[in-house]
Image (cartoon, rainbow, N blue to C red):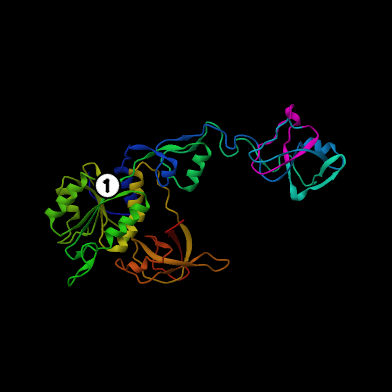
Amino acid sequence: MTNHTGLTLTEAEQHLKQMISPLKKTEIRPLAAATGAILGQNLVSPINVPPSDTAAVDGYAFCYAAMLASPDRRLQVKGQASAGHPLTHAFIPGTAIYITTGTPMPQAEQTDHSPDTIAMQEHCEVETDAGGTWVTLPDALTKGSNFRPCGENIQRDEVALTKGQRLGAAEIGLAAAMGFSQIEVQKPLSVGLLSTGEEVHDITLTSDLKIGGIFDSNRPMLTSLLKSDFHHVHDGGIIGDKLEAVTHAIRNMAEKADAIILSGGSSGGSEDFARQAVEAAGGKIAFSGIHIKPGRPFAAGILASKPVFCIPGNPVAVFVTYRLLVADALMRLAGGIPRPQLRFPVICGFSAKHKLGRTDFVRVTLSYDKGTLPVATPNGRFGAGVLTSLTGADGLLEISADHGHVNEGDQCHFIPFRE
């Protein structure tokens, strides 16, 4: 495996795609426990949804041809059907019935005379006399109005959900509509976390800082990101800046986890041992160094067939590189299909210097002026260690490598933190 250096973000994404293959570990889960899981099979519908022609409104169902044959569009009402209580007799040709939303359309003995149109009740005139109840239908109707045809949503034997999809609320609802009470899903990944640094302190072990010390924010933040992506976390704690200690910790974590994230020690300084430790443990670094800011020292490799991500120690770089690179790589490892990063154009509400050949990601908030694209302004101060630039931000402004200095009014792409 060749150690490529100085890649663009796109090149780094391609390398990760080539070096990571999906794990094939599935389990059966009740539908109620499948939210966030990755579907482990194509889900083929055993039924039509809806299973029959179904009323979409409360109103009067009739055969359109019968209405046309009535000079005053007036039909006698001969029955009522409601959800859970369909019409108990065959539909009488030349009449109408009252029907409620979600009720199967009734059938006549001869199919050609079955109701095929529904008029909303608020558009109808209803009167009762000694001869019965009559409905006068509106003239602004087209044949087939206001009912859902059988299989409109899903047809029997159709692949409704695809293997590798993440199961959110809509997918869970769709699976339930097809009658699935349990489904096959991919087992969650176990991801090992390690922080490095002599100056880093664990908030769970001490509340006192030594001179020059800092609390470790990276592992708690990564834990939150990983759990939000429905992965399990193995917390390996903080490792001092010793090559032997980091090597041992990485080798030990490779026996427990499906993937490893190491924060800190990736820059290549005299006390930075992340990449050396991966290779000392028997692994290989696939690439190191990306032309992005923050996150330039990011590296990735393989140890014992497990991907290892060496993330810079600055907290903002941790967050940004996880969102841009690690999240999709783990999704692919878990058997999922990563979705393209959502980007849309915005107007820069500020000016800033920018180095050609490097892609910068600025934490921004959006404001909206009527008739224009959203305007992006920096959230807090610049800097890869300024966590407050993330809190309250709407997303990342992407200043592309071929964009010169940024001037207020320029157009750039925006990557949201939430959909």
Residue type, numbered disc 1: Ala
Q: Is residue 355 left or right of residue 244?
A: right
Q: In the displayed structure, would residue 334 be above or below residue 366? A: above
Return the residue at label 1. 259
In the rendered image, residue 111, in percent from the top left (x then y), is placed at 72, 28
- One can see residue 365 in this view: yes
Based on the picture, tell me whether residue 109 belongs to the magenta stretch. yes
Tell me if mark 1 has few (under 14), some (14-19) or many (20+) residues whose alpha carbon lies within 10 angstroms of its own.
Answer: many
In the rendered image, residue 394, in percent from the top left (x then y), is placed at 43, 63
Rendered residue at 36%/70% (across/down): 353
Rendered residue at 45%/38% (across/down): 162
Q: Quadrant of residue 418?
A: bottom left
- One can see residue 294 in this view: no
Which quadrant does the N terminus fall into?
A: top left
Magenta region: 92-117
Q: Name the dominant secondary structure of the magenta segment.
A: loop
Q: Is residue 328 left or right of residue 171?
A: left
Q: Quadrant of residue 42?
A: top left
Rendered residue at 21%/42% (across/down): 304
Q: Quadrant of residue 87?
A: top right
Q: In the displayed structure, would residue 49 be above or below residue 243? A: above
Of residues 54 and 394, the one nearer the viewer is 54
Of residues 296 and 231, the one nearer the viewer is 231
How many marks the image carries: the answer is: 1
In the rendered image, residue 61, in percent from the top left (x then y), is placed at 74, 40
Of residues 22 and 408, the one nearer the viewer is 22
Q: Secondary structure at mark 1?
A: strand
